[in-house]
Image (cartoon, coloured by chain):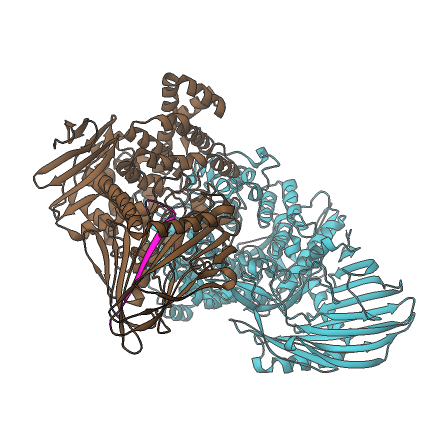
Chain colours: A cyan, B brown
């Protein structure tokens, strides 16, 4: 049995159990936003493992599998690719291969230090004669130079002198476990192995992404008796065979300096040369200096985005793990990248972009980074606008419909009830424009680029609604709302409400631009061919959008006919029913009243300031009891709303549901990788939920409370060039302006002026 | 170019065009209800062809392909199998292989004689030296002995003496074109080849169906110079190589006598022996005698079920083609068999049983055959009752839910919106019990077996409806009606109406049985564990079933919210829109008002006597203009209703849409096989539509009219031990009781007594 040890800064595994290896590989994942690794062993491991080396932006359009084709279905599902395995080091001691699936060992410990972002491992290996060797490994993926990684692999002989054979290598013969047709996605381009360095250049099929990995090595504590280039599998496996002797009581350390380059950043023809050069340079700089630069970057990350919790080490470990993994996944330096639901920790869900980015992750990057990072996420969608227009045209509509799942802007999901009908995603994208502009006070994106997104999505809505002459309203038929336990419904309140909002936001922005930015406005009008009639139509639709509600109950109706369902609370279901997605057939789920994740309530969170507390209470009390929270994205929204309506214990309860989702393997699926996007929801539960953070009338508002079981907690906010640290304890709230100009904020209902050096 | 020649009794192809080969192969298909063949060439053909040899009831559960799994999805899709190719005869003349894709030829003619059910082919082959040979082939699949088929293959040398090599063979190395994973579905068991006979025994993987084919041969008009057993492909290809000489002006005929057996009818271990014995016996009996017995059966079929049309040869050919193919597909002798939508003419739709059987085909077999044939179709469902109960249980329901598509009683379709939601199929099955009982006046099936089907499907409905306390009605949420251009709707009128009827029919039947068949009733109550409470529930649900309607418009509403759609008639669509299933994305189809096939109107046809003419007119006028008829099953229902409400020209127009659907390749998909089940709809258009045939109060009613462009038409009806021939011409209607006891019927509104020998 392996133990997962609770610790403020580290994820620690003590003991090794093959059955839990995938789980620990997942939670020991790390990355630098440009590449990432699961916590795989460096040396050979013939037991059950999910090998995972992922290079950001390098994907493969795997042909989709569907039984029955329907017009408009995407033909492929873009998958994140398991790439060249560059961590590998084959170890043989006295010709016995080190492989934890096939040898004796003790004192296994694997730990991920989140503060410094380094993965360490140690164990004592016992060979067939009973001789013992201490093995210690350490590796990091540099946050200072995104192309680099380095490994230190140390062996101490405890009992004997022995012959040691080490083979650091690169292996391009890798596959995805979930390939639809069991195909290999890579082809070999070139490679080179010498006795001091190697490189390997592979290219993806179809998408033609070129990736090269190179390494150099260094040995400390021994003389190299023999070294030899290794060139196997027609060049897809290259490395150096190093023979040395290890003496009793002595330690030998192999350092492997790796550089990974791709034609996403360099000219394809030169990537191997660049990688080899960077690997050589790393060797010259040395491990410690490289590591120092890396650590500094992480120190900076934590200084801007840490959350501390006193009196609950599990909670502290949980929230830091979430913040850590979000930083591993996305650094914001490249607007072509985004946040896959599993980040660099697994293959599932194809590693693509969902509406999760805008609806759940956006606030995290906005609140813990310089604005340019969140802006990168906006640019991502702006750059896909043409593809979104093609997507709408393919469905017979005008304007732009963003895909539900994408890598390069094209739709690559293949359930019709999702791709064709879960169209509310367009609104999350315009909503992110709004919160970016509001939070940063920077309207440059909005007026330069965002406006195009607003207008084109509005055009889509104008063609997608239908006017009902009998009721004199606009309707939106045949949609799937955020609650995916309903399909093909009419007038989903969330969708209609967000569309109404989005059209109004477009109209308001156009109005503002025409007044304040006349030149940009005129240029845009021309660029988009926008007419006054069109703007009037947007306004008309927004004004007459149909919003189903039941006046008697005082609630908004999730969709037309919702009250015809049998309304029995989740509490009445038996244990054999839950989770319903595992125990009920799909039709039964669909016609039941049960809600997968916040739907009406998602709208009340997004359009928070448009609804009264009483409205929120009535809808929360109506819908929450019907909600099964079978999406990891559900609890955070409920936590925030519960906090807002004064249900602090409920808010904390919902927070707990996702805070340690992966660490505690709640859903029994951590093996496949981590729930990256829901981690941002956990952050929101604390900052927007417990902390009550909002922007109202352009001003930062806070209204924190402290969960009972915590002694104290604090969170940072990067806000308009400042760093704020908010600390909440039994006796009250302290706000520390750690950096930046004085700032007026609203604390609860009071105006407070923050100044550096003075706590309030 | 090939020409399709119009003829009263024959389907004639003149000329050969490789591009049209699949089309002609489809329309030249024939069968005997136990096996069937596409019109493939006997000699090798290396051009584009869909090889098709199908053995009834022998299927393979191909693993389904779906992108995203949902609870309750079937894991396989049962496919009709392309089986041992037994028609093959390799022909070489002077060592040149005869292959119409690779040689010169002229005067190609292929004709299917429907009267005698024989496929004939002739052409003149021109060898590389320019010498000519007339080739004539003829084959039939015996309707007298379902295991047998025979071929006559004649060659006449016109110019030269030549060496002739003939190789009649059996080939088990066959595949389905539409195998999901390109797998072979058969494994080899054993085979034997001698110089006078061969057999080949193959077994399906997974389902373990054993099939054996054997043949013997005979040559006429020449001496055999050499004969040699051929055993290739590890025994999967067996036959006899026959060498002979052909002299200028002489004809040589090879006769191939084939028997095909399977363990559906014989002990698996003995099937090859039986097949070989039957092949040998056939050789002894001889081609002509076998053919005579076969012809006699077909003469009988035509005497009971022919329709004649004077003054329109295309119409005559069309309707006979439909009647012919329906007889090839299903003979009713085996209640384990059913009517696949493509019969024995192609692989598409898996060859399984749909609700088409009861909703569209049932009347045809009822009206043209002895009652036991239609009863076989009822027994098929009765025998699957246990599986239907398992299916309901799997979906968390009580009672029985029949599968939407099946081979052996298990669901094998895999679109959730169909399998989970198109539940109205249960009602077509109970409805067939009703019309069987009514038409034949034989209640034995109903009280012995049908009642179990009624009770178990009623139990399903009782668990599937939900009670709405606010409206005090029962509702059925989340269904797909017959109109598959809607999915997951609430309260589909057709479904709710048929469920209401079905529950009432169950209650009435129970009531009748308790009065008239007390012993059977008591036994059944015990067998099914039926309580009075349950019966009361059935009655209550039937009585309070919610039926959406719009009183102002005077129409029944296809489903809740139907009037919220944009109601624009099909006539307003442009040519680039139609068919919408090829030009519109699925979401657009779903939210549009367009109807794929009769839905509300299907209910008005089934429950014909419960609605007034005015109600039918209002609903017809409301729904028909919104209907795109993109299912081949749509026009017949509209034709019947149009006829009933006095729209005779419309009725004829709808009739024309399907009468020659395959012959004229309207949908451009005849290549894949024929639309067998819709052929029965065409028959209904004439008999129930033009002929106005109904059963009212236990009495046969007719109210025929004559389409203007026809001089005269007649149809037969097998009715309660009688054969009636109804002839309709300009001057009126003649009804001829061809066989049986006197009968009172209603003609228009008059009572008429029919007597043999006296026309009325």
Look at the picture and state if A518 lies above or below B217. below
Q: Is residue B511 left or right of residue A252?
A: left
Q: Is residue B265 left or right of residue A365?
A: left
State the residue at coordinates (20%, 34%): B724
Indicate the quadrant where residue A110 lies: bottom right
Q: Is residue A64 left or right of residue B491?
A: right
**Magenta segment range?**
B143-158
Locate residue B412, reporting x and y percent: 46, 46
Q: In this view of the protein, which residue sits in the foreground, A658 or B586?
A: B586
Q: Is residue A440 left or right of residue B441?
A: right
Q: Is residue B485 magenta?
A: no
Locate residue A107, reporting x and y percent: 84, 58
State the residue at coordinates (71%, 74%): A169
Chief secondary structure of the magenta span? Answer: strand
Locate residue A434, reporting x and y percent: 50, 58
Q: Residue furthest left?
A: B731
Indicate the quadrant where residue A24 lies: bottom right
Look at the picture and state if A425 lies above or below B613. below
Q: Does the image show residue A757?
A: yes
Q: Does the image show residue B669?
A: no
Q: In this view of the protein, which residue sits in the foreground, A632 or A50?
A: A50
- Quadrant housing the C terminus of chain A: bottom right
Q: In this view of the protein, which residue sits in the foreground, B46 or A472?
A: B46
Locate residue B682, reporting x and y percent: 25, 45
Q: How many marks?
A: 0
Q: Is residue B148 magenta?
A: yes
């Amino acid at each position: 049995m392996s133990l997962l040890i609770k610790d403020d800064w580290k994820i620690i595994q003590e003991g090794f159990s093959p059955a839990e290896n995938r789980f620990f590989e997942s939670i020991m994942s790390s990355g630098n936003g440009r590449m990432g690794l699961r916590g795989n062993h460096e040396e050979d491991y013939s037991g059950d493992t999910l090998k995972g080396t992922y290079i950001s932006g390098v994907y493969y359009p795997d042909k989709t599998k569907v039984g029955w084709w329907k017009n408009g279905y995407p033909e492929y599902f873009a998958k994140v690719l398991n790439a060249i395995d560059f961590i590998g080091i084959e170890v043989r001691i006295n010709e016995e291969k080190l492989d934890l699936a096939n040898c004796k060992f003790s004192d296994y410990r694997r730990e991920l230090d989140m503060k410094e972002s380094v993965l360490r491992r140690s164990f004592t290996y016992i060979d067939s004669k009973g001789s013992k060797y201490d093995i210690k490994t350490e590796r990091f993926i540099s946050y200072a130079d995104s192309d680099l990684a380095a490994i230190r692999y140390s062996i101490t002989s405890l009992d004997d002198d022995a012959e040691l054979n080490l083979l650091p290598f690169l292996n391009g013969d890798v596959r995805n476990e979930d390939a639809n047709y069991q195909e290999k996605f890579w082809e070999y381009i070139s490679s080179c192995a010498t006795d001091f360095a190697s490189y390997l250049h592979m290219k993806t099929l179809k998408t033609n992404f070129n990736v090269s990995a190179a390494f150099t090595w260094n040995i400390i504590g021994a003389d190299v008796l023999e070294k030899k280039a290794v060139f196997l599998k027609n060049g897809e496996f290259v490395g150096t065979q190093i023979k040395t002797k290890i003496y009793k009581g002595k330690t030998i350390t192999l350092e492997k300096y790796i550089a990974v380059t791709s034609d996403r950043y360099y000219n394809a023809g030169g990537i191997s040369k660049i990688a080899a050069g960077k690997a050589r340079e790393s060797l010259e700089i040395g491990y410690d200096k490289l590591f120092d630069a890396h650590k500094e970057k992480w120190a900076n990350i934590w200084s801007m985005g840490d959350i501390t919790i006193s009196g609950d080490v599990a909670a502290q470990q949980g929230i830091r793990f979430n913040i850590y993994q979000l930083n591993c996944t996305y650094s914001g330096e490249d607007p072509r990248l985004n946040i896959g639901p599993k980040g660099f920790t697994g293959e599932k869900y194809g590693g693509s972009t969902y509406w999760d980015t805008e609806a759940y992750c956006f606030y995290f990057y906005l609140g813990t980074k310089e604005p340019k990072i969140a802006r990168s996420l906006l640019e991502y969608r702006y750059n896909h606008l043409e593809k979104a227009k093609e997507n709408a045209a393919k469905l017979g509509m005008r304007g732009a419909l963003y895909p539900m799942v994408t890598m390069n802007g094209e739709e690559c999901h293949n359930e019709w009830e999702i791709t064709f009908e879960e169209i509310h995603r367009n609104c999350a994208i315009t909503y992110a424009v709004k919160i970016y502009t509001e939070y940063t006070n920077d309207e440059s994106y909005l007026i330069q680029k965002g406006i195009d997104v607003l207008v084109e999505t509005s055009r889509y809505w104008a063609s997608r609604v239908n006017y009902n002459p009998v009721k004199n309203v606009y309707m939106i038929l045949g949609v799937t709302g955020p609650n995916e336990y309903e399909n093909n419904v009419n007038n989903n309140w969330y969708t209609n409400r967000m569309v109404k909002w989005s059209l109004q936001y477009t109209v308001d922005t156009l109005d503002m631009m025409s007044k304040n930015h006349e030149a940009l406005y005129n240029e845009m009008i021309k660029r988009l061919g926008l007419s006054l009639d069109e703007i009037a139509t947007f306004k008309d639709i927004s004004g007459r959008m149909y919003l189903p509600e039941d006046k008697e109950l005082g609630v908004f109706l999730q969709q037309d006919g919702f009250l015809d369902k049998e309304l029995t609370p989740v509490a009445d279901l038996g244990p054999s029913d839950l989770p319903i997605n595992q125990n009920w057939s799909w039709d039964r789920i669909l016609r039941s009243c049960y809600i997968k994740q916040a739907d009406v309530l998602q709208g009340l969170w997004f359009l928070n300031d448009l609804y009264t507390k009483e409205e929120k209470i009535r809808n929360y009390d109506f819908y929450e009891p019907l909600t099964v929270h079978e999406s990891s994205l559900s609890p955070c929204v409920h936590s925030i709303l519960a906090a807002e309506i004064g249900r602090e214990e409920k808010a904390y309860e919902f927070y707990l549901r996702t805070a340690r989702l992966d660490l505690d393997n709640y859903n029994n699926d951590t093996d496949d990788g981590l729930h990256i996007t829901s981690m941002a929801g956990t952050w929101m539960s604390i900052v927007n939920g417990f902390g009550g953070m909002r922007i109202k009338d352009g001003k930062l508002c806070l209204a924190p409370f402290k969960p009972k079981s915590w002694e104290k907690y604090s969170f940072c906010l990067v806000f308009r060039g400042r760093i704020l640290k908010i600390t909440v304890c039994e006796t009250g709230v302290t706000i520390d302006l750690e950096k930046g100009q004085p700032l007026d904020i609203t604390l609860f209902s009071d105006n407070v002026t923050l100044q550096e050096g003075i706590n309030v």
